[in-house]
Amino acid sequence: MRLITLEDFKDIYIKFHQRGLTFLLSKLSFNSYLRTKTAFNDFHIEASNFWIIPAVRERWNILITGNAEKTYEEFITENYFQDKKQLRVLSLGSGVCSHEIRLAALNPHWEIDCFDFSDELLANAKNISDGKKLTNIHYFAENIMEFKFEKNSYDIVFFHASLHHFDDIPNFFTNIINTALNKTGYLIINEFVGKNRLQYSKIQIDYINKALKLIPKKYRKILKTTLYKNKYYSSGILRMIIADPSECIDSESILPIVNKNYETILEKKYGNNLLQSVFKDIAHHFVPENNETLSLEKQEILNKIFKLEDEFLTNNPSDYVFGIYRLK
């Protein structure tokens, strides 16, 4: 367990340049709920995270659906639940709702209820779904932990990168998820299930730094700074709690509790053990400009890092999992 690291000081400096002093000062609140909210309540942030890289998204598609061009939403639509005339879906911690909106468009027979504490993100999502004339998706700005969900009322509970933000996973499942689901209900997750508070093992940190060495210096320049990303030191718990008290708070408990309560219908483990940390703040270098094709040099760099991550995953558990499960 690392209380504080050099990575923490770097991150504070980077956040100052990327998001400004007002954002940093918001983290001084003693209210953990408000600190968490400031981490999400803005959809206009210019950031450089690994998920913006098209080749990374294609890698996910290959590992989850078997097709670089097919998203998991399309995969679900083609292969599951089409025999149901109507499904009620509960999405918890839905944020910008991009995946829920896509699922609503692909599945007119789904009625999707999106719950999140960020009224700004939900308002933006509603504008988007209204523009698409979708009438089967609904938005609720609520504190999920305090909201009284109707028992046995949903056919599916859905999480996309939000379940790892909930504390005390066993009780969360018992009191909210399993209660809201009907007795033959399904759980769909696309989630980080790795170490609590990103407390990576030494071997994982070593592999992350091996991957960084594969990237030429010119592509390691950190967004909106004069710094270069030369080494990764891992995150300290203190900064993580201050920045976002909910981040990976009990992520290690997710798969054990899912396996205890649910039958596995489909489970795809797709890594990101290296990619998430390697490309943080430098991912923009690997996004083609003006819809042009990524240069051969950059493609080769990405392929080498993908290969290194595959090597790591042969003997280590995946940090990310996509799964469809049925309540036992």
Image (cartoon, rainbow, N blue to C red):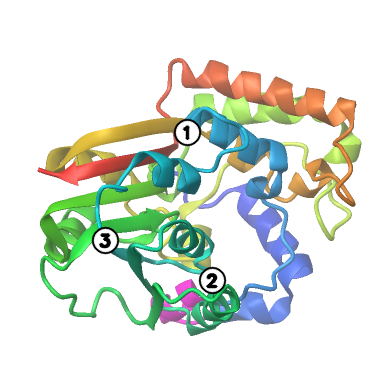
Q: Residue at x 51, y 24 (%)?
A: 203
Q: Is 9 located above or below residue 199 in the figure?
A: below
| Amino acid of disc 3 | Leu
Res 133 quadrant in image: bottom right
Q: Quadrant of the C terminus?
A: top left
Q: Report the magenta residues as a range.
A: 27-37
Q: Quadrant of the N terminus?
A: top left
User: In front: 162, or 11?
Assistant: 162
User: In front: 44, or 188?
Assistant: 188
Q: Which residue is mark 2?
A: 40
Q: Earlier in the sequence, mark 2 or mark 3?
A: 2
User: Residue 100 bears which disc, if any?
Assistant: none
Q: Is residue 282 visible?
A: no
Q: Position of residue 101 (x, y in %)?
A: 49, 65
| Amino acid of disc 2 | Phe
User: Residue 87 bears which disc, if any?
Assistant: 3
Q: Which residue is mark 1?
A: 64
